[in-house]
Amino acid sequence: MVNYSGLRKFFTLECLYHLSEPNAREADLRLRNKEPSLSQSVILTKHKSVRMAHIIWLRNDLRIIDHDIFHHLQDQPIIPLYIFDPREHASDAWGHSRLGKHRRRFLMEGLQALREELQSRGSDLCIRHGYPAEVIEQMHQHYTIEGIHVYGHDAYEERQQEEAVKKLGIPFHLYEADTLYHPADLPFPIEKMPFVFTDFRKKMEKQSEVRPFPPTPKQFVKPEIDLDWGDIPKVDYKIDSRSAFPFRGGTRAALDRLEHYFWETDQLAQYKNTRNGLLGTDYSSKFSPWLAQGAISARFIYHQVKKYESLRTKNQSTYWLIFELIWRDFFRFTAKSEGNRFFRIPREVKAMRIPAFELWKSGQTGEPFIDANMKELAATGFMSNRGRQNVGSYLVHQLNVPWYAGAAWFESQLIDYDVYSNWGNWTYVAGVGHDPRSRVFNISRQQSMYDPEGAYVEVWGK
């Protein structure tokens, strides 16, 4: 029996990856062969004063484990930088705050956890507020920025951020997508992306492999510059005692959850049978908020599943968790292939007050199962996958409210909001995206199947 208690204590190759050293070296070689070269002028000696730095621009990749950029720059002076872009924290067309209170709390916890991990390795996390291009330009006026390093995105707003920063003229290094399968390993040109998930999954499983990943750096180089690292905003938030997701943000919390779900309770071996549950913390893995935040990577989870299969058991449930990770890649690569067409929003969106939409949001439709799910979302920022399918179908097909209004509300409320999965799933439910079949749920039948005793409605229907 292997003791995995070390997962929580220290992020090292030996404790976390459970991969052989040859695999780690292979990952290192693969990454170095593909990464941009750095100016030789910034190679350090132990006695040289450092007055220049590379910026690691962080967005939804708030970790150092399985992070190609941190690995690549571990011997260079770095400024890990997180920017609160006002556009991401503004209101949408319906007046919803795009970053609602649930995800905001989780984000601040994730930032604090990352700051502590960086500080333990000799670095820190720089916090700024403003438009990224303006923030970085201002920093560059005070000291030399040797390069800007960031994971690329495939959504419009994120690409606009990148284009604005590129125009500064500072060496700009865009790293490949933070996905389960590396984009370079797709067995087809991105323009030939399969339209249906099943076709995509079969091609990937048959013709591609998930790469290993490099060791976590044990130490970073902090530039010798006069830098105000900034404060992480405080939030006043109390977790609802009924919540199915009573967890904190950050990598340490994600690793605790993985250790519990895999190694302490063997819940992974039951995942396929319990994943449609509604109450409690263990009916599903609950990894999605940390994946959306980037506190843990899909690739890391995949290799842990494989290790679990080799040490404990391999069955349909262990495969099904990987199956769900492939779904995330499907939406991400579809967005990469289609660009703005992925979102399928009409050019002229007129946000108007729709009474049925307001009742749906507040859990007052009169349909007990729907209302219970919507109240859970409002109170906790979380909802089961079964609940999301039902409330989405009900909004679109019973209430005849535009699907993109629901997608906007989910963006505001969900603690695990991910631009690709959220918009991809809503177009899927509405029948306007990939595999456009009718998905009208019989809500009464769904309730009788998944809440036959009414326990869920009893908890959240009040």
Image (cartoon, rainbow, N blue to C red):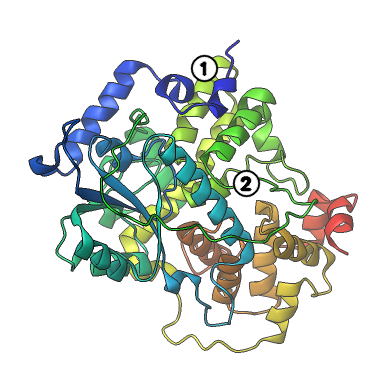
Residue 360 versus residue 262 in the image, above or below: below
Residue 430 versus residue 251 in the image, above or below: below
Callout 2 secondary element: loop
**If you read the primary sequence from the N terminus, does the residue marked by circle 1 or circle 2 appear first?**
2
In the drawing, does residue 379 fall left or right of residue 319? right
- Let me know if residue 429 appears in the view: yes
Give the label, 1 or 2, closer to the camera: 2
Residue 157 versus residue 45 in the image, above or below: below
Using the image as rendered, state which of residue 16 and residue 398 is in the foreground.
16
Q: In the picture, which quadrant includes the N terminus?
A: top right
User: What's the mark number on residue 361?
Assistant: none
Decide: few, some or many residues near mark 2? Use Cα within 10 Å; few <14, some 14-19, many ≥20.
some
User: What's the mark number on residue 310?
Assistant: 1
Q: Which residue is mark 2?
A: 248
- Residue 276, how many percent across, how many down? 71, 46
In the drawing, does residue 61 fall left or right of residue 405? left
Residue type highlighted by circle 2: Arg
Quarter location, residue 4: top right
